[in-house]
Amino acid sequence: MPENNQSNQNSDHAKIKELLEQNLQLSKQIYQLAEKINRWIFWQQVWRVIKILIIVVPIILGIIYLPPILQKVFAPYQQVLNFNSAKPSANVIELFNQLKNNAPDR
C-alpha cells in the first residue's frame, strides 16, 4: 500500500506540475495581451491630444492674429462710413454730399 500511495503522490505531483506549466503559459499570453492593450491605449491618448491640438491651436492663433489683420482690412471702410459716430444716417448724408462735391463736372 505504501507503494500505491507513493505512485498516487507522484501522479498528483505530475498533474500539479503540468497544471502549473499551463498556468505559466496562459499567464505569459495574458501578459503579452496586456502589453499590447497598454500600447494601444497609450497611442489612443496621444492621438486624442493631437486631435485636440489640431482644433485648439488654430482657434488660439486666430484669436491672437486675426483682430489686427481685420482691423487693417476694415480701417478704410471705417474711415469712409465712420461707424464710431452716434448718428450713422447723418454720415451717409455727408458721404453723399462729398460724392456730389467731388463728382466731375459734365
Image (cartoon, rainbow, N blue to C red):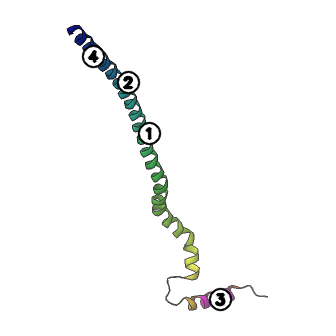
Q: Is residue 36 above or below residue 14?
A: below
Q: CA distance from mark 2 to mark 3?
A: 91 Å
Whichever of callouts 1 and 2 sits on the residue coming sooner in the sequence is: 2
Q: Residue at x 41, y 42 (%)?
A: 41
Q: Is residue 101 left or right of residue 8?
A: right
Label ID, residue 25: 2
Q: Which residue is labeled 4 in the image? A: 13
Q: Quadrant of the N terminus?
A: top left
Q: CA distance from mark 3 to mark 1?
A: 68 Å
Which amino acid, by three-letter code, is at mark 4? His
Q: Residue at x 44, y 41 (%)?
A: 43
> Residue most toward the right?
106
Q: Is residue 43 above or below residue 1?
A: below
Q: Secondary structure at mark 1?
A: helix
Single out the mark in the foreground, 4 or 1.
Answer: 4
Callouts 3 and 1 close, C-beta under 8 Å: no
Q: CA distance from mark 3 to mark 4?
A: 108 Å
Callouts 2 and 4 close, C-beta under 8 Å: no
Q: CA distance from mark 1 to mark 2?
A: 23 Å
Q: Position of residue 60 (x, y in %)?
A: 45, 59
Q: Which residue is labeled 3 in the image? A: 96
The kind of secondary structure the magenta stretch mainly shows is helix
Nearest to the observer: residue 7 or residue 91:
7
Q: Secondary structure at mark 2?
A: helix
Which amino acid, by three-letter code, is at mark 3? Phe
Q: Position of residue 44 (x, y in %)?
A: 44, 44
Q: Which residues are magenta?
A: 92-100
